Amino acid sequence: MSDAPKAPRRSNAVLAAFSTVCLPLAAFGVALPVTLPEFYATHVGLELGVVATVFMAVRLIDITFDPFIGWAMDRTKTRFGRYRPWMALSTPILMLAAFMMFVMVQPGAGPVYLFAWLLVLYLGFSIGTLGQLGWAAVLAPEYDQRSRVYGWWQVFNIIGVILILILPTVVIQTGIGDYADGVRIMGWAILIALPVTIGLAFLAVPEPVNAGAQPHGGLGAYLELFKRKAVRKLLLADVVLGVAPGITGSLLFFFFGQIKGYGHTEASLFMLLYFVAGLVGAPFWAWLATKIGKDKALAVASLVFAAFYIGATLVPGGNFAVTAVAMFIAGLPYAAGLFLLRAMMADVGDEVRLETGVDRTGLMFSILSATTKVGHVVALVPYLILQGVGFQAVPPVGGNSPGSLLMLQILFIALPGLLLASAALCLKNYPLTPARHDEIRRELEARDA
């Protein structure tokens, strides 16, 4: 067993309070790739290609925000902590964006409206998520405890996704309104949850401060991180693990509606079961990471994910129960990449602090956030491909052409499956083993003392 120094073990109550912030942030996280593109294409009335172009353009701009936000976070020193002031700043920005994107938008709103408010939303989302990830990294510096913190983080992320996905279905089934009303109520739920959960975290959760020199260097420090083998492998894995579910989310309603013959509510339930399974499976992957290391656990999860996903998508339509079970099984490995990659990047941050004497946690998470967004950008390319082969979001009389429906199946089934499997290859010969990280923690503890 490890003889690395033991950091204070955070109570479950503290980790739960910290992780409640994931509820509204995860709601944004699922709305951005899944709900909003489809909502703006069908209910607001923008063309598929226009929606894809606007989302891709905003995400490419947003990627440039991340290194500056990360750099600024690493230079922040206040009596409230390094990351909490940034999370406070993100709250009003996200509340305004949710109000305009979900609640106020009307059919006929143009691409300029979508572009402007999407840019505001992404700015707030970047600040909020980077602040929370940085805070998580300093909350538990020890290898296995860090897996536990990010495991809690991921569990609440999935709960947030499940709750927000249930809302439109509940609105429809109870007769409160239609799907568009459900999306507006989704916006109100996010608006209310943001100040409540962030306030709770501020009151209940400490923010330890890492020892280390004031960060220095701008672009050079950012580029220097890419020279590290561990960083490059994590970023490659993050891109492929981001693109695969991004494609699944962006095409899910089209696939289950036009290929399998299910309605919007049924497709939402399949997605809900998929995320519930991620919640059920998360503790297993966290446990496996403590037994064989985070990198090997993630490689196993990626291969299992690819096999389960392809199997679920090949289940014939017409049998709701069988498809529901298949989608649940497919979602069991879903959470592994999301929390293990972030825990692994925090581990690399310890190595950087040992070698440079500088805490670059914010900058490192900004890189990971940027690659996640690259994945989201690439995940929208299928919208452009589908428009190119004549596919229509609202099918014409007689339905879409057989060729366009075949392309939809290739993009939804084969492409994500191959991407998920490739993540295991990205992680081969990952250099930062549990033993090496224990050694780093011992040296850091001795130097900080």
Image: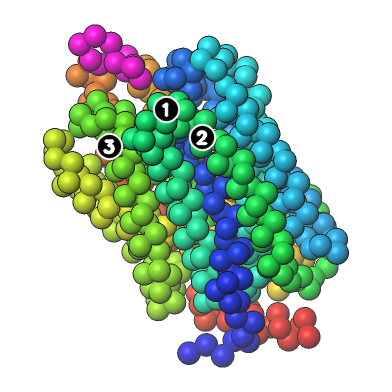
Residue type, label 3: Glu
Residue 337 covered by magenta stretch: no
Circles 2, 1 touching at the beta carbon (< 8 Å): yes
| Residue 435 in view of the camera | yes
The image position of residue 294, as x and y in percent, is 45, 69
Q: CA distance from mark 2 to mark 1?
A: 10 Å
Q: Nearest to the eye among marks 2 and 3: give it.
A: 2
Up the image or down, 130 lies above or below 28; here it is below
Q: Which residue is mark 3?
A: 266
Quadrant housing residue 418 = top left
Q: Which residue is mark 1?
A: 177
| Between discs 3 and 1, the one toward the N terminus | 1
| Between discs 2 and 3, the one toward the N terminus | 2
The image position of residue 182, as x and y in percent, is 45, 32
Q: Which residues are magenta?
A: 389-400
The image position of residue 237, as x and y in percent, is 46, 53
Left/right placement of residue 138 relative to residue 38 reads right
In the image, what residue occupies the spot 42% across and 49% down?
162
Up the image or down, 399 lies above or below 339; here it is above
Q: CA distance from mark 3 to mark 1?
A: 17 Å
Q: Which residue is mark 2?
A: 185
The one of 7 and 70 positioned closer to us in this rendering? 7
Up the image or down, 336 lies above or below 206; here it is above
Q: Which mark is residue 94?
A: none
In the image, what residue occupies the spot 37% across and 30% down?
175
